[in-house]
Image (tube, rainbow, N blue to C red):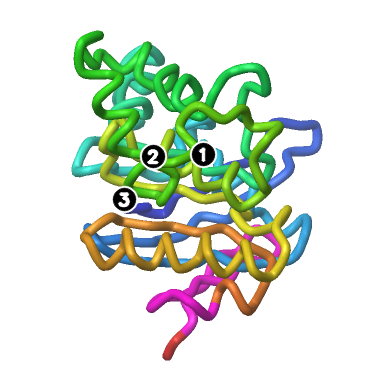
Amino acid sequence: MEFRQVGLTYPGPPPVPAFRPCNLTVRRGDFVTVVGPSGSGKSTFLNIAGLLDAPTHGTYLLDGIDTGALKDADRTALRGRRIGFVFQSFHLLPHRSALENVLLAMVYNGVPRNERARRARAALVRVGLGHRIDALPTRLSGGERQRVAIARALVARPSLLLCDEPTGNLDTKNAETVLALLAELHTEGMTVVVITHDPVVAARAARRVTIRDGVLREVTP
């Protein structure tokens, strides 16, 4: 993903600059954390990077594609194919099994029906939940639920894994398990961007970016 003077200002009156124009390049295979306090602009960054909001300034390239030149339907399709989301609150359907939650992520991604079950099972095995495929989220620990959410994000084989406070609802042990899994995925070549308020989580990445008052800055090692 590449930001070229990307910014977002909400219309007024008066106009509110939520995200100041900035440059940022995340290369294939990078592991980057974006750290900042509440109200710093992290959610705005997530919405722009995840193609949920369009910037009002600059150009956002995802896999070399100018996302600002796309129609809404094409942006939605690009998001579904290229970006996997992991959220703090898991967002699992409580009355669907782990397998069904992962399967449902492929319904709108154009994955052939006869491939969905195989890919969903493989994704759950990859995150260490091959033995919990049929369990309901209500019968899983917080760490297991987050790993189901990661499997759901991976099953469409995205080029970017975008994680919003992925350890925010977890205890220390489960948080460490999830962070270790993200590190493994990065080692295997996945591009990972983690948005967090926790400096301990931020320190796990090779690259760190700070955000405060809508201003993005890379931390020099």
In this rendered view, identify the residue nearer to me: 13 or 23: 23
Q: Which secondary structure, mark 2?
A: helix
**Residue 44 image-quadrant placement:** top right
Return the x and y of residue 97 as percentages of the image width and height: 54, 23
Residue type at mark 1 is: Ala
Residue type at the position of mark 3: Met
Q: Which of label 3 and label 1 is nearer to you? A: 1
> In this figure, which residue is indicated by the disc labeled 2?
124
Q: Where is residue 186 in the image (x, y as percent from the top left)?
A: 31, 63
Quadrant of image for the C terminus: bottom left
Q: Nearer the viewer, mark 2 or mark 1?
A: 2
Q: Does the magenta portion include 217?
A: yes
Looking at the rendering, the stretch of residues picked out in magenta corresponds to 203-219
Is 116 left, or right, of 129 in this rendering? Answer: left
Which residue is pictured at 28% across the width and 19% down the height? 116
Question: What residue is disc 3 on?
Answer: 1
